[in-house]
Amino acid sequence: MKISNGVLAAAMVAGLSLSGLSAHAAGPGGWGGGMGVGSTFGGPGGNALDGLDLTRKQRNQITTILKEAHDQDQAQDTQEEFENLHEQIQDLLSVPGPLDQNQIAQVQQKMAALRAEREARHLQTASRIHDVLTPEQLTQMRERQRKIHDLLSQLNALQHPAQQISSDNQKK
């Protein structure tokens, strides 16, 4: 079965978002107890706040914001619900006979709503953190993110040269 790049990317983002807060919050290490903000401040290349020279006040504010976000995610734990929906999709796809596209669409809509709610919470957290940082720190963070993006693009081009050639031909 062929999976489109968009579906694969969505699955990866969902996985990063789901694991971001709980994985970073679980262990000690790094500033703020190692808490991250899912796909917004975490993800490939690590936490976007790494390397910033934060004041003690900023560290405390951000740690508080991340703890509140983590507690909210735990209180609104959608992971089990998301897993149940995923299991429903698997069940629907494994039933002999014609697929019930309406049921699949309904479950898919529920999954999309859960993802949207989670992403909205993560963006709210990122917004609160943004407001704690200075313009210089935001510029430093943005430059680091661009470097990471460029390096990941170079890595992708090396790992998948045929896709790069195809993309270049499409631009012409």
Image (cartoon, helix red, strand yellow):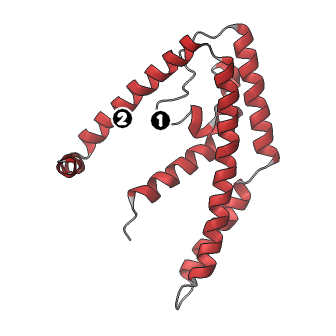
- For label 1, the SS is loop
Q: Is residue 95 above or below residue 141?
A: below
- Closest to the observer: 161 or 141? 141
Q: Are marks 1 and 2 in contact (CB under 8 Å)?
A: yes
Residue pushed farthest right?
Answer: 75
Residue at left 64%, top 62%?
A: 111
Residue pushed farthest bottom?
Answer: 97
- For label 2, the SS is helix
> Which mark is drawn over residue 152?
2
Residue count near mark 1 (Cα–Cα under 10 Å), binned few <14, some 14–19, many ≥20: few
Spatial CA distance of label 1 from label 2 is: 8 Å
Residue count near mark 2 (Cα–Cα under 10 Å), binned few <14, some 14–19, many ≥20: some
Where does label 1 land, which residue? 44
- Tell me residue 49's x, y (percent): 58, 22
- Closest to the observer: 42 or 94? 42
Q: Quadrant of the N terminus?
A: bottom left
Residue at left 41%, top 26%?
A: 146
